[in-house]
Amino acid sequence: MSLPKWCSILLSCVFCVVLSAGTAFAAGDEALTLTSSTVVDGDTNLSVHPVIELQFSGKVDDITVLSQNKDCFHLQDENGSVLTLQVLFPDVQVQTRLVNHVFLVPKDSLQPGASYTLTIDRSLMDKKEHTLDRSYQIGFTTGTDEVYARGGENEELIGLGEDILSYETALAPPSASVAADTSADASTDAATETSSQTLLRIAIPALILLLGAVGFWNWRSSRRSSTDA
C-alpha cells in the first residue's frame, strides 16, 4: 500500500517550514555586533584625554569598508556640539592580532567634570557587508582630577606604534541613528529572532511526529503485504 498523497504533501510543507525558519534564524545571527568597549554607558571619572577601544564581531577595519566606516563614529558634548575624533584602525596587514578593533581619541582635550556622548551609527559595516545590529550611544563623564581619572592610556594602541590607519571626523550623527538608538531596533530584532525560534520549536517536533507516522504506515503496509502473500 503506497503512502497517502495528503501525507506526502504535508511532509513536504513541514520540511519547507523548518528549512525557512532555520535559514531566517541563521541570517539573524549574521548581524555585526559591538562585543566590547573600554568605556560603557554611564561611565564616570574618565580622563580628559580618553582612549576608547572598541571591538566588533566582524572585520570593520578591512580596507574595503574603511572609507565609510571612518565616518560612523561621533562625539558630542552636553550642549550637542560635535567634537573632532581621531578614528584609528590597526593596519590589519601587519597587526592581525587586533583585527576588528577601533580606537577613538578626541583631537582636543575634553572639559573636566563634563558629560559627553559617543554615537556609533548602525551603518557601520564589516568586510562581509553585515551592518551593525543597532546604533549605539555611550554616555560618559570626565573626572575633575586627571591624576585619578581613568582611560588616559591604552597599551594596545601604544603597542601598535605606527601600524595604524588614522582618520579625523567631526560629523554629527544621523538623526535616525540618535532617534532609534537601541530600543526600537533591538525590540524588532528580538521579535524576529523569537518568532524564528518559536517556529522551529513547533515545526521540528511536528516533522519528527510526521516522520514517525510515515515510518509506522510503511511498516504496517509491509506487514499487510507479507500477510497477504
Image: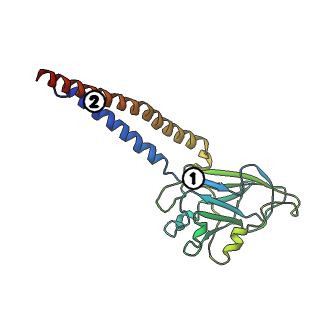
From mark 2 to mark 1, how far is it between C-alphas?
44 Å
On the image, which quarter does residue 3 sit in?
top left
Question: How many neighbours does mark 1 have within 10 angstroms: few (below 14), some (14-19), or many (20 or more)?
Answer: many
| Residue 179 percent location from the top left of the image | 61, 46
| Residue 219 percent location from the top left of the image | 24, 27
Q: Name the residue under label 2.
A: 215
Q: Is residue 16 left or right of residue 45?
A: left
User: What quarter of the picture does the C terminus occupy?
Assistant: top left
Q: Is residue 126 left or right of residue 162?
A: left
The residue shown at (39%, 32%) is: 203
Q: What element carries label 1?
A: loop
Considering depth in this image, is 111 or 79 the residue closer to the camera?
Answer: 111
The amino acid sitting under disc 1 is: Thr
User: What quarter of the picture does the N terminus occupy?
Assistant: top left
The residue shown at (12%, 21%) is: 228
Q: Name the residue under label 1.
A: 33
| Residue 155 percent location from the top left of the image | 73, 69
Question: Does residue 108 sit above or below 26 in this rendering?
Answer: below
The amino acid sitting under disc 2 is: Gly
